[in-house]
Amino acid sequence: MRLDHIGIAVKSIAASRKFYEGGLKLRAFPQVEEVAGEKVKVLKLDLEPGLHIELLEATSPDSAVAKFIEKRGEGMHHLCYAVDDVVAATHELEMRGFVPIWAEPHVGAGGCLVNFFHPKETFGVLTELSQPPVSGN
């Protein structure tokens, strides 16, 4: 398991990329991706090989990101850990008493299979587990 990305909730990807690309000089992935199931747009920015920042902009006022911003303002939304098998990693955490947000993983940004653990379960940090998509399909 390794840190994969840091999710940052923003009101506007267009406005926030001025800081991340212009100020910090991070390289953005070629396009903004829409994750319809989560009602967000995502822009990935490289930090180093295998580690990136995801800027998360809500596409609907009832999305988790919109509710997060309404309650807490813009800022760090979650930490994501890359795992080889999200089902097995979720099950292992469940066996240790941690309850995932979803009973089954969902498809997230980049086609990754993901699941989340609520901050109440993880000492204040929304935690995502992410399995890369199977290549060659």
Image (cartoon, helix red, strand yellow):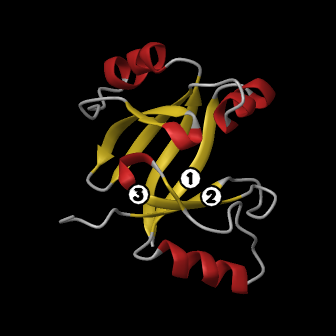
Q: Name which of mark 1 and mark 2 comes first in the sequence.
A: 1
Q: Is residue 47 above or below residue 27?
A: below
**How far apart are the alpha carbons under marks 2 and 3?**
15 Å
Query: Which residue does the numbered mark 2 point to in the structure image?
Result: 127
Between the C-alphas of marks 3 and 1, the distance is 15 Å
User: Which residue appears at 38% of the width and 46% of the height?
Assistant: 52
Q: Evaluate if marks 1 and 2 touch, with contact meaning CB atoms under 8 Å apart.
A: yes
Q: Which residue is mark 3?
A: 112
Where the N terminus falls, by quadrant? bottom left
Look at mark 1 in the image and give the residue it sits on: 79
- Which residue of the protein is positioned furthest toward the front in this rendering? 137
Classed neighbour count for the residue bearing mark 1: other residues with Cα under 10 Å, few (<14), some (14–19), many (≥20): some
Find the residue positioned furthest to the left: 136
Few, some or many residues within 10 Å of mark 2 (<14, 14–19, 20+): many
As helix, strand or loop, the secondary structure at mark 3 comes to loop
**In the picture, residue 84 is in which quadrant?**
bottom left
Residue 73 percent location from the top left of the image: 72, 25
Q: What amino acid does circle 2 point to?
A: Thr
